Every structure is written in C-alpha cells, then in structure tokens.
Image (cartoon, helix red, strand yellow):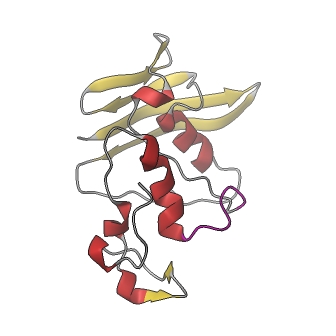
Amino acid sequence: MALIVEGLIKRFGSVAAVDGVSFTIEPGEMLCLLGPSGCGKTNTLRCVAGLETPDAGTIRLDGQMLADGARGILVPPHRRRFGMVFQSYAVWPHLMVCENVRYPLRFGSERETPCAWFDWRSTRNGFPISCPVGNSSASPWPAPW
C-alpha cells in the first residue's frame, strides 16, 4: 500500500506553504520530514491526512486518488484511513507517546497497534528513547479499546 505524493502545492494567499513536494513511501518503509520551522512539514502532512486542500499536485494511496488539486478531487479525512498526532503535546499532555499515537486509531476501522513500532525495553519513565520495530506485548499499558 504505497503512499505517493507528486508535485504537492499548498498556498495561503500568495505564500506557498508547500511548493512542489514529491515522495513515495512503500509498504514497510518510514519517512521522516525534516526541516526548519515554517518549511511546510506540517502542511504537507495535513494535506496527506485531508485536513487541508492541496492547490496542485496529487496524493495517492495504493492506487486510489485521495487528492488532485487540478481536477478538484478530495477524499474526505474520515475516508482516508490515516491518523495524525499533532506536534504539540498540549493536545493530550497526560498521555504517553504511544498513547498519543494510538488515540486516533480508537475510532478507525482497522485497529492496528502502533506500539509495535516502539521498543519498550529502551524507555525511561515510559517514554521511548528510540523507535525501532519492537514487540507490542512489551508495552506496559493496555490498549484503550
């Protein structure tokens, strides 16, 4: 189930918040968006999640067109099978990292366990130090559903 983003553009007035971003994430791969504040990382993710409407470019998941700015195609967020954890812990400051990641999945149709992404043996005070593939059964917290 590849995610393909091609030529993504998102403008706010005359300001290009995202300007021609393209990437492909194949099944089993992870991608990290790195850059300085204001470079378009969050707006790119908001477009992928369907929280923003791209002005140009395409977003496809497993061959299905999720967004095409030129043709006015926009699949709504609740039909995309994505969850998004915002960068501020002000959303759920009382939750641990895995619980913040797991929270959006409580309401989805597929209840995967993102805790499998973390190696819970390498934690301090319940917060992961690194995020290698690990064993979800090693999580000290029960699933919230």
Relative height, residue 62 to residue 118 (above, below): above
Q: Quadrant of the C terminus?
A: bottom left
Q: Is 94 one of the magenta-colored residues?
A: yes
Vertical side of 106 occupied by 77: above or below: above
Q: Is residue 33 above or below residue 139?
A: above
The residue under the point 61% across, 41% down is 43
Percent position (x, y) of residue 103?
50, 54
State the residue at coordinates (50%, 32%).
8
Main SS type for the magenta part?
loop
Q: Is residue 44 above or below residue 66?
A: below
Residue closer to the observer: 9 or 130: 130
Residue 85 place in picture, x, y as percent: 55, 53
Image point 42% across, 48% down: which residue? 105
Q: Residue furthest top?
A: 71
- Do we see residue 134 in this rendering? no
Query: Quadrant of the image for the N terminus?
Result: top left
The x and y percentages for residue 67 are 44, 23
Residue segment shown in magenta: 90-96
The count of marks equals: 0
Which of these two is toward me, 83 or 131? 83
Residue 89, position as x, y percentages in the image: 67, 63
Residue located at (31% from left, 43% from top): 110
Locate residue 29: give its quadrant: bottom left
